Amino acid sequence: MLEVIVRGEGAAAFCSARLLNVAGVYARLERAEQVRVPAVMLGEAAQALICDVFENNGLFAGLHRIEKRVVAWGRDADPIALPHSSVVISGQELSNRLCPTLPDRDRHEPESPAWTIHCSRPLPPGSIEHNFGTRIARASAVELKHPSNSGSCWIESLESGWLFLVPTSEKSGWLLSVGGPTDDFLGGSRLIVKQIEPPDRSGGEFPAYPRIATPMCGPGWLACGTAAMGFDPLCGDGTAHAVREAILAAAVIRASEREPGENILAHYRTRLLAGFKRHLELCREFYQRGWSGPWWDAELHHIRVGIEWCEAELGAEPDFRYQLNGFDLKRISAMPREIR
């Protein structure tokens, strides 16, 4: 039987281990500590995808819901309210709900597994990280002034960064300050400062700049989740992307047994690079409209450098030779490039 070690503790690790074991592959989860964000917002599409992986439609029952996004984005911008639909969950609670019950097999642990999936730090041996920005997120636990507003998340750009308020109940939530000290930012806030009492405790810091590791795969190993890349929390697609990476990683390993060779690994690398480039392009759109001045110009420069780097890595036109069909990877029938 094919044997795989999955190193990690987050959504990518649990999803890839789950899919491999369901498919009859012996996947052993090797826990690894990782930085956990205090609050994750999962949209309906991300929830549906995760529930599909775990065949459990009740995974996110009972969580606090966000139904509106209030945004003041740009110098002197008036707040606008936009429809939204998501649930809020802590990184730890997400891991608790996703941690799969792996098959109980009476057998020795593999000494030399056929594959290793790296889903958490440290990076795989030989990989280096490329960072496209310098911004750090500072998290603070806060009490809400107006419980009636707990169904909304709040986003506000400032001269040297931005604030993101995520309620986790009718009375409390988490405030992310990206780019500078929380107290300083609240001093310049026109929107979010009105929604909260002064922060009472810190939830730590974590990188908020996009980053990617290379190489991200090789013979017998794949990088996935935070070991492969990190996303700006402003875009809200980090967890969903990690799950999609896990689905692809599990499918690549299974397909490689049917069709050994470098083509499948090249497809994995290209898909992850293309996804990272799309994320940077979304960041560019947001940061172009966020404000103006030295901080925004510097971060926007890093984003543009990242897009150029991705374009150089991908080449003029990525050649995708496989596609996911459900949770399986299938070869695309050959067709002339000019009509792809």
Image (cartoon, rainbow, N blue to C red):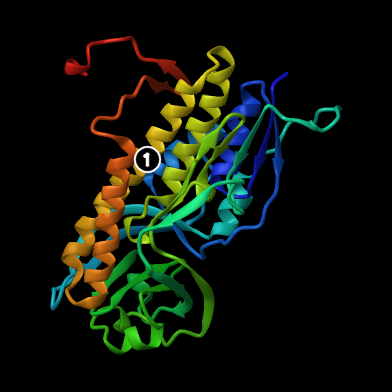
Relative vertical location of residue 10 with respect to residue 105 in this rendering, above or below: below
Q: Going 22% across and 63% down the picture, which residue do you hit?
A: 287
Question: Residue 67, percent across and down?
Answer: 32, 57
Quarter of the image with the C terminus is top left
Question: Which of these two is toward me, 255 or 310?
Answer: 310
Total numbered labels placed on residues in the image:
1
**Label 1 secondary element:** helix
Q: Going 82% across and 33% down the picture, which residue do you hit?
A: 109
Question: Residue 232, percent across and down?
Answer: 37, 59
Residue 112 relative to residue 246: left or right: right
Residue 126 relative to residue 134: left or right: right
Name the kind of residue labelled 1 in the image: Leu
- The answer, for residue 327, to whether it is visible in the render is no
Question: Which of these two is toward me, 149 or 247?
Answer: 247
Question: Residue 268, percent across and down?
Answer: 45, 31
Looking at the rendering, which quadrant does residue 29 occupy? top right
> Callout 1: 10 Å neighbours few (<14), some, many (20+)?
many
- In the picture of the structure, the residue carrying the numbered disc 1 is 273
Residue 43 relative to residue 55: left or right: left
Relative vertical location of residue 261 with respect to residue 26 in this rendering, above or below: above
Q: Going 23% across and 67% down the picture, which residue do you hit?
A: 71
Quarter of the image with the N terminus is top right
Relative vertical location of residue 302 with respect to residue 223 in this rendering, above or below: below
- The answer, for residue 85, to whether it is visible in the render is yes
Question: Residue 255, percent across and down?
Answer: 53, 19
